[in-house]
């Protein structure tokens, strides 16, 4: 199977430790993190994705906001630059250790953080990155971090 992700979730997954907007959102994201850690690939999509699913039925879904779409655009550019190619919907990405380690190193260095401007999770993600990515749920934590 394949996990469908929007571009900014390529950054979010780097620091996801199990917290989220609602209990249903967190449960869903943890299941997706398990799938990605088990080797499922990613299909880059435009708009709401598998992670957004529990929120999409809300009256004013966060996932449809212009600020989120803007975050997707910036994230696609940042991750694309990191890997030397333009990321477009439909592209397949393998979230293996090399991808995750390189993306986390760039995240920690601030190379991809412009896409995170204005995100309510910015502080938490910063603390996770600065803490060596301890407790992350996608892949193995680099830099000697550990799962919680």
Image (cartoon, rainbow, N blue to C red):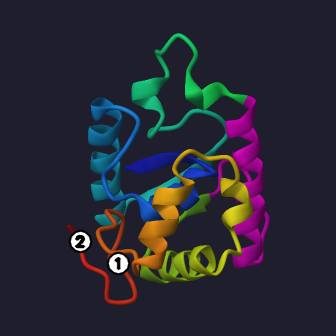
Q: Do the residues bearing badges 2 and 1 touch, measured as CB atoms within 8 Å?
A: yes
Q: Label 1 neighbourhood size at 10 Å, few (<14), some (14-19), many (20+)?
A: many
The overriding secondary structure of the stretch rendered in magenta is: helix
Q: Residue at x 57, y 28 (%)?
A: 62
The boundaries of the magenta stretch are 66-91
Q: Residue furthest top?
A: 59
**Viewer can see residue 91:** yes
Q: Which residue is mark 1?
A: 141
From the viewer's side, name the closer residue of 134 and 47. 134
Q: Which residue is mark 2?
A: 147
Of helix, strand and loop, which one carries label 2? loop
Q: Residue at x 37, y 60 (%)?
A: 36
- Name the quadrant of the C terminus: bottom left
Displayed quadrant of residue 86: bottom right
**Viewer can see residue 95:** no
**Mark with earlier residue (2, 1):** 1
Q: Which mark is residue 49?
A: none
**Residue 67 inside the magenta-drawn segment:** yes
Q: Residue at x 71, y 77 (%)?
A: 82
Displayed quadrant of residue 140: bottom left
């Amino acid at each position: 199977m394949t996990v469908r992700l929007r571009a900014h979730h390529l950054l979010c997954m780097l620091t996801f430790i199990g917290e989220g907007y609602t209990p249903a959102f967190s449960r869903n994201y943890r299941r997706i993190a398990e799938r990605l850690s088990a080797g499922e690939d990613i299909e880059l999509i435009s708009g709401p994705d598998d992670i957004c699913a529990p929120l999409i039925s809300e009256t004013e879904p966060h996932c449809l906001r212009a600020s989120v779409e803007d975050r997707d655009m910036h994230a696609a550019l940042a991750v694309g630059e990191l890997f030397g190619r333009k990321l477009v919907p439909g592209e397949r990405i393998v979230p293996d250790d090399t991808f995750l380690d390189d993306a986390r190193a760039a995240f920690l260095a601030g190379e991809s953080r412009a896409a995170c401007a204005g995100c309510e999770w910015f502080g938490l993600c910063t603390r996770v990155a600065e803490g060596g990515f301890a407790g992350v749920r996608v892949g193995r934590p680099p830099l000697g971090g550990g799962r919680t």
